[in-house]
Image: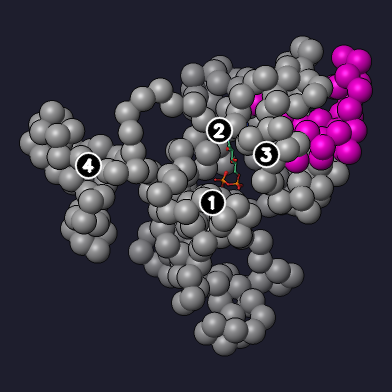
Amino acid sequence: MLSGGEVPLGGGTSLQKKYGVVDSADQVYLDHTNHKNSDFRYCDRDLVRMWADENAATFEFLIENDVKFNDEKPEMVNGGSVPRLFVAKVYSDDLAETINGRPGSGLVRPLEKSARAKSVEILLKHKMTRVIRENPTSGGVLGISATSESKTVNIRARKGVIIATGGHTSNVAFRRMFDPRLTEEYQVVAFLSARLGTNGDLGRDGKANGGGPIWAIFDFDAVVREKWDPKPPNVDLNGWFFSADTIADLAGKIKNPYQRRGPFRPACWSRR
Ligand SMILES: Cc1cc2nc3c(=O)[nH]c(=O)nc-3n(C[C@H](O)[C@H](O)[C@H](O)COP(=O)(O)OP(=O)(O)OC[C@H]3O[C@@H](n4cnc5c(N)ncnc54)[C@H](O)[C@@H]3O)c2cc1C
C-alpha cells in the first residue's frame, strides 16, 4: 500500500465541518462528473455515485482507525468546488516505519496497526498466482494459490475472495470499459498505480500477469542482484526493450512513436 498521505475525501467530513466547509455527497458527485472538468467528465456515473456516497464515511473510518490528520484548513483538489484535501500526520520519525518522514506513513501505518489488532493476518512475500474455482475456468471461487519462497501455498476461502492487487489502469481492456479512448498507446504513470501488481487481469487461465514500471533503466548489477532474465518472452525486443553499454547509447536507441519529450503534467492530483 502506497500513499503520499494526501486524502482527497469530502462530502461533509468532520474535519471539513470543523473548518466551516459545507459539502455533501451530491456535491462530490457533481464535481467528479462535471463536464467542464476534462479529467472527470468521462467518469463512470454509477461508480462515482457510489464513491461520492462513501466519501465522508471513508474519512471517518480512517479517523476511527487512528489515522491522524494535520489540523489545517483543507485545500482545493481535483477542480472541486469546495476544499477537500487533508494531509495525514507523519506517523513517526523512525526510518524503519516511514520514508524520510513523509505523510504517507500517517495513513498506512495506523491502518496496518488497526488491521493487526483486529486479527488480520498479513502474509508478506506471498504472490498470488491464480484464483481457484470449482472448475478450471468456471464455477464458484474456492480460494487462491500463491507462491512463497518457491513453494506453492493454497489458501481456502471460507467466506469470499477480494482481489485488491491494484494497477488496473494498466489493463487496456479493463480501462476501456470506463473510457474507450484509453487505447494501448496511453501509458499510465508510475505515480498512478502503474503496474504495481497483476494489472488487474488474471487472464483466462486465472494466472496473474505480473507487471512492471513503464520505463525502467537498470544496469547489469541489478540484473544479477534481482535474478532477472531480460530475454524474450520476459522482454519485448520489438520496440520495448533496449540495451547498450552507456546511457548515451541507450538514449539513442530508444524510439517510441507514442512518446514525446516535453513538460509533463499528471492528469489529476492537481490542487486547484
Ligand atoms: C508514490 C505514490 C504516492 C501516492 N500518493 C497518494 C496520496 O497522497 N493520496 C492518494 O489518495 N493516493 C496516492 N497514491 C495513489 C494510491 O496509492 C493508490 O491509488 C492506491 O494505493 C491504490 O490502492 P489499491 O489498494 O487499489 O492498490 P495498491 O495500494 O497498489 O495495493 C495493491 C497491493 O497488491 C499487491 N499485489 C499485487 N499483485 C499481487 C499478487 N499477485 N499477489 C499478492 N499481492 C499482490 C501489491 O504488492 C500491493 O501491495 C499514490 C501512489 C503512489 C505510487
Q: Which residue is mark 4?
A: 255
Residue type at mark 1 is: Arg
Q: Which residue is mark 3?
A: 40
| Lower sequence index among marks 2 and 1 | 1
From the Cβ of disc 4, is ligand 1 less than 8 Å away? Answer: no
Q: Secondary structure at mark 2?
A: loop
Kindly identify which numbered label has been placed on residue 181.
1
Across and down, in percent, residue 22 comes to 91, 23
Seen from the viewer's position, the closer of residues 133 and 167 is: 167
Using the rendered image of the protein, determine whether residue 158 is visible from the camera's viewpoint. yes
| Lower sequence index among marks 2 and 3 | 3
Q: Secondary structure at mark 1?
A: loop
Residue type at mark 3 is: Phe
Across and down, in percent, residue 199 comes to 49, 55
The residue shown at (63%, 55%) is 178
The residue shown at (59%, 32%) is 268
Residue occupying the far top of the picture = 72
Mark 3: few/some/many CA within 10 Å (<14, 14-19, 20+): some
Count of marks placed on residues: 4
Mark 4: few/some/many CA within 10 Å (<14, 14-19, 20+): few
